Amino acid sequence: MQKTESVATKTSNQSVKFVYFFGGGKAEGDAKMKDLLGGKGANLAEMTHLGIPVPPGFTISTQACQLYYERSLQFPQGLKGEVESALHHLEGLMGKRLGDPQDPLLVSVRSGAAVSMPGMMDTVLNLGLNSQSVNGLATKTGNERFAWDSYRRFIQMFGDVVMEVEHHRFEEALTQIKEKKGVHFDHELDAVDLKELVSQYKRIVREIRGQDFPESPIDQLWLAISAVFGSWNNSRAIKYRQLNEIRGLFGTAVNIQSMVFGNMGNTSGTGVAFTRNPSTGENKLYGEFLMNAQGEDVVAGIRTPLPLAELKKVMSQVYDQFMDISKKLEQHYKDMQDIEFTIQEGKLYLLQTRSGKRTAHAAVRVAVEAFKEGLIDRKTAILRVNPTQLDQLLHPMIHSKTKYQVAAKGLPASPGAAVGQIVFSALKAEEWDEQGKKVILVRSETSPEDIGGMAVAQGILTARGGMTSHAAVVARGMGKCCVAGCQDLAVDESGESCRIGKKVLKEGDEITLNGSTGEVILGAVPLVSPEFSGEFGELMKWADEIRRLKIRTNADTPNDCKVARRFGAEGIGLCRTEHMFFEGDRIDPVREMILAEDRVGREKALAKLLPIQKGDFIGIFEEMEGLPVTIRLLDPPLHEFIPHTDEEIRNLSKKINVSAEKLKAKSESLKEFNPMLGHRGCRLGISFPEIYKMQTQAIFEAACEVSKKGVRVIPEVMIPLVGDVNELKVLRTDLEEVARDVMEKAHAKIEYSFGTMIEIPRAALTADAIAEVAQFFSFGTNDLTQMTFGFSRDDAGVFLKDYLEKGILQDDPFQVLDRSGVGAMMKIAIEKGRSTNPKIKLGICGEHGGNPPSIEFCHMLGMDYVSCSPYRVPIARLAAAHAQLKNG
Amino acid sequence: MQKTESVATKTSNQSVKFVYFFGGGKAEGDAKMKDLLGGKGANLAEMTHLGIPVPPGFTISTQACQLYYERSLQFPQGLKGEVESALHHLEGLMGKRLGDPQDPLLVSVRSGAAVSMPGMMDTVLNLGLNSQSVNGLATKTGNERFAWDSYRRFIQMFGDVVMEVEHHRFEEALTQIKEKKGVHFDHELDAVDLKELVSQYKRIVREIRGQDFPESPIDQLWLAISAVFGSWNNSRAIKYRQLNEIRGLFGTAVNIQSMVFGNMGNTSGTGVAFTRNPSTGENKLYGEFLMNAQGEDVVAGIRTPLPLAELKKVMSQVYDQFMDISKKLEQHYKDMQDIEFTIQEGKLYLLQTRSGKRTAHAAVRVAVEAFKEGLIDRKTAILRVNPTQLDQLLHPMIHSKTKYQVAAKGLPASPGAAVGQIVFSALKAEEWDEQGKKVILVRSETSPEDIGGMAVAQGILTARGGMTSHAAVVARGMGKCCVAGCQDLAVDESGESCRIGKKVLKEGDEITLNGSTGEVILGAVPLVSPEFSGEFGELMKWADEIRRLKIRTNADTPNDCKVARRFGAEGIGLCRTEHMFFEGDRIDPVREMILAEDRVGREKALAKLLPIQKGDFIGIFEEMEGLPVTIRLLDPPLHEFIPHTDEEIRNLSKKINVSAEKLKAKSESLKEFNPMLGHRGCRLGISFPEIYKMQTQAIFEAACEVSKKGVRVIPEVMIPLVGDVNELKVLRTDLEEVARDVMEKAHAKIEYSFGTMIEIPRAALTADAIAEVAQFFSFGTNDLTQMTFGFSRDDAGVFLKDYLEKGILQDDPFQVLDRSGVGAMMKIAIEKGRSTNPKIKLGICGEHGGNPPSIEFCHMLGMDYVSCSPYRVPIARLAAAHAQLKNG
């Protein structure tokens, strides 16, 4: 269901090239070929061109992966030959042969998509070892232990990834042998132990898979290529792409590269580095390394690595060389780089470079500073910051002046603060989140299987792993607070408890994390919103200069208004009035109105609500001085205000002295089969004109009062759920009369307008007629999505899950605006609306108003503004600037 | 909310002419000017041109009425002058002056819209009388009783219609005076009595209105004109226009005509006649008259009139003259005429001619015979029969061989038969109808207020009134069975009972009416469908030759198929399969499937359903030999198959041996907030592929089996509720594989196709993509209307009523397809669908498929077929011919 064109349809002849070589100072690819070679492959080629030491190898293209899927998991024609010839070339260059019993060439087989998906897909290292070549490796390196350790690592990794033997089966055998030997660490096992472990591993494979572990290195290679292709569509990779809105890719590339070993002794090592601090953005090399270790050891977070500065003490020449290379790479790519390296017996190799993932905080600082350093222009700087990511800057933090007791300290792996109840499994996190609980995921270490639980948690706390551990990298990507490698934490995952220092915590206990400092605090600490100044303020200013779309907010209270203005909102796009009907004692006159037998009774109850609503509007108008305020008249069906259970009815009955029977009868009579499509919105306004009249009176009385204080007030009265121009005509005529009466009595003149939501398909289709009576349209894309798709948002969860998994839909249309359906409807409405009313103001107030791709679409449609929740206003400001920069 | 252009916008200058004179052999208008002069005014002018004796007068145009409404009930500028000058002209012609105390001109003031709305709007007779001129009239006519009777009639009518004094107040005074005098009939009162009655009437007016009855004839005239204009928008007129889908008119005209009197003694009289029998269509003059009576006496049904043939005995010369005129009028208008006449002292005057309302039976016969007589061409003949009206021919009748006991006999006022429970008020009829009861409305006589109750009743029975009484005319127009003037019936309306012969019946008792014979039968007599032959068959053949649209039927059973084929269906447009899931024991495996834990369990249950579904399809395929059969796969949400009340759950629990808790939990888990927009249609097919696979297997196994008998089978598999092409792609791929497997196994080749419903807005908007995968589109306009409007059909009743009453919507969109919204959506779908698949077959299977204006719209969209319920197939055939004739 990918939307990219197939290779087969693109090139009907057989001249498609699948394999791209790099090594010996030359490469067939380059950094621009990410789509075809994946990020890793393209950058390995680029680094080769730049003369940077990269172990030679070759990349199988993403198109080969796509064809592999199109041909029902068969390798495309021609691939075999190309791989074999690249392998021969590699063997020539390295002077070794794959499977050579004397001096075997060993290779790594790694995935690499056009967009980085860290840890989501599969990797096999040390491929090429078998029962013969392991001896050759031992002889050639003079290191028998190394040879057998490499072999057992290979079997373990290949067995897990390719042969699908559960990881823990190997771990158990490893633990047993360590216990038998009475040692604690893997490196305490000697060659003899490892030989025994290898035969045990082979037995486990035979037992579970019913076949021997493959001896033939070329078979190993093809099986590994299959497995990497296959991992493109494993469930966690699919989920990751969904979460990160990654789409339109062909598949994964496969990088086959000669092995270099960081575990060949004390002059070998491996590490990762960022050219700037990925957490704060500070322009200072930042990394970690482990001596005598393979790369996976650092990333997996099993051993806690050393800061990169330490390397200077260990191998100062290598350190200097690495500093030079990293500077060169940042200058070349003009962005902060995330680099993997290995040192084999004192020689430095670069294994990967890519644009480094960073916190929002770092993203903003790096972008602004890179502009100031002259590295990039302002436009590029703006585009460097992902608007969605800003979300993490907009979340609450612990106030600098708050006093609290720190129970433990870990690494400040991802900034921001979080409060929640602790859980010890990703599954539980998801369950509790569905129940509306706020959770903190506490794990010894996280793994890619945990991704779902991490996504819903408020924050993540781990006992093991460093700043580049899985937990840290993923949490930063998600903009989620994370404290990693907290040594005072011991997690008993099966026992559903943990120990922090001396204190034992159970599932459900509340803690607070400060991801900016690494602090863990028992209990809940109050959080505050951060200030927006410095680089952030600068970037926002740039964005505001560029964007064309105005950004408004959805706000129902003076406090919402205050927050939103601080975040840069330029008006209210949606002020819901039903909220004001629910609060505190107000519900009583509301219920009185609903229970009234006739208009007179309703008007009596509404008269009680009038001063309250008026007060609400006064607060909002004062807060929004000088900015437009769009007020939506009552929208939800009346039954939402009436209790439904017998007990609630009994209580209300006593309270308002109306018989329970009558209440029950009313509740029954208001029940609807499909309330979404029932008696609500302007349909209520038509049936009970007195409700909207009261609301309009409250709006204009408030406006007159505030305006007399010299505050500029711009109310925009919005009629919801219009499907036919006559609804709007009838209501606008009546309500404008109310408005004029109020203004006349107050001797005031208010700048006001009347408009409508466009949220019903028929409104979009007849927008030409409606625009003759409306001064603005505000697209209610929540309801418009429900009706355009025929999806009830409350019920669609059941099948939407299937739809996303099966790729029938690319996105949840309630999160990302569906351009081809709902978007087409909006386009029709805008064209028709402008045809009769060229000056009509156009906005959006559905939740899509805060979603960057949806904002881009609104920009493309030529709308005037988007409106979103207060906390998303800065995101929308930046997204609007992106939209302008990308689309003009 | 009328869609016609305003006069004001049409003619900006002041040269609009409002008043059109007729009389003295000349007329300013003619029959073609119906829109402007109303039917009555145009025909009075036309008759004047034809030299037919018509009392002179003038007509105020419908545009004046429209302006009257546009200017908030102010007469348009210029009207006053034109009316006064026409009045002078009339006075000159008649040699009398309005209000002349010696010899007053009296006029009638009558409504008359472009489309006949009998009895819906107001009329005032004898206008011009006051306390002085009544004496002049007495002197001049030498008939004091006549003068005072005219005066009291005038006060009564003017008081009711113009001054809104309740009718019964006058009736009570009249009854009192008759009682005092000890007489039974109005005509037994003498001049003295009537004088007293007049003063009582005046007192009543003063008492209720607080003002005197107007003395000034010119004031009387303007008040009457206002009242007639006002009656255009009284509630019964609005309701009548809705029921009869009359729209786009300016308003009513007002006809002011010099009075002639049928109540001036025994050489005076009044009557109505049809040039052919309006019940059977027989080419024979058909009418009734009353001597010494005013026109309203005949129509109101208060006295039972004599057949027109009797007039020959009474006044043979007048009779002959009338016969000549009526023949002339039919020849002139080329259609059966409904004529009103008055004889004043031996002189015949024609007061009205118009196209006569007729039963469907008569309409068909008149149309076919008029063609054969050479009066009209075939095209005109087809257009003469209103397709909607055919409905009454398609309804059940009492079989000619059924034996039954007749309890009473009335006039056969409107043919067909009806069975139902009796009610004595229109309100009750509407209430009971809403509860799903079939009712017969029983009244002494009906009045325009009863129209709502008549519309919902199965049939109407009245004690008083003739073949042209209100009940008879309205019932024939509605195609509803009616027995009128049943003298053995006595209705006690307040006591809610009636007596038929000696038997007393209470509300709710069941009776049967035979409107073709006038028979009333106690209890229910079984009804049968009529045969279609003779003129009806001929007309249908003509329609079939002309129409382009194919007519299919919605049928779920072999019996439906049989009926539909007899009615001329050319295939099945919608075979719902869920029906087959509910019947008898089938519900058990269906429930077993729903309760299954996994796919294996579901498949086990589905295996039990397979042979049953296959059997269903065999029956249908055999019946539909040679014609296409569109089968819709399962559509409703699963919860419809599971019981919901505790008792039902307990019963099912015992029956299928599953715990009540489990059943309840399942029932709860399947509950949805908005089931309309929930887990149904192809969404079920995606979640549980095995259901659609079973259904497809059943369809193709049945098709192979029937086809092997030499019967041609053309199944069309239809996927419901598609909103995205990927849904269809996934399902079609899977199901076509099932189809091919079945055909392969059976060594059979079936002509089949796969297609989809278009019933979700998004499907219409993305129809270009969908059409690449679909071989046909069938518009499910029920759901498409729900989603385009955002109206839940089950819930919309509450506000739709308000919408229709307030004129926000012209029609219930579930009955008449909404062209500007839903229709626009269909147009988009068709254009987009054809852009990628020019050969795609297009049909409609919503209920609109049987609604003539909707059928016309489908024709205009260039669709291939409409599908409707079996009983509406002939209506659709004729409507499709009309569509072709009107639009080419």
Image (cartoon, coloured by chain):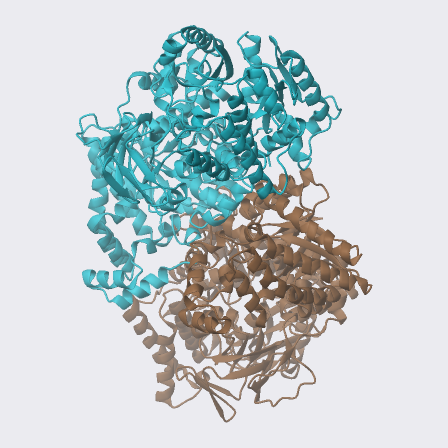
Chain colours: A brown, B cyan
| Relative to B99, residue A47 above or below | below
Q: Quadrant of residue A246?
A: bottom right
Front residue of B577/A595: it is A595
As rendered, which of A670 and B93 lies closer to the eye? B93
Report whether residue B415 is seen. no
Give coordinates of residue A546: x percent, y percent: 75, 55
Nearest the eye: A116 or B674: B674
Residue nearer the viewer, A575 or B628: A575
- What's the residue at 57%, 89% (across, down)? A407
**Does residue B865 appear to the left or right of B23 in the view shown?**
left
Residue A49 at x, y percent in the picture: 64, 58
Q: Is residue B370 visible?
A: yes
- The answer to whether B74 appears left or right of A144 in the picture is right
Locate residue B266, reporting x and y percent.
44, 15
Q: Quadrant of residue B484?
A: top left
Report the side of A207 relative to B493 (left or right). Answer: left
Vertical comparison of A439 with B881: above or below: below
Q: Residue furthest right?
A: A710
Residue at 59%, 59% in the rendered image: A603
User: Which quarter of the figure has residue A612?
Assistant: bottom right
Q: Is residue B607 above or below residue B646?
A: above
Where does the image place residue A415, in percent across and percent down from the top left?
63, 76
- Against B159, residue A166 (above or below) is below
Residue at point 31%, 47% (across, down): B692
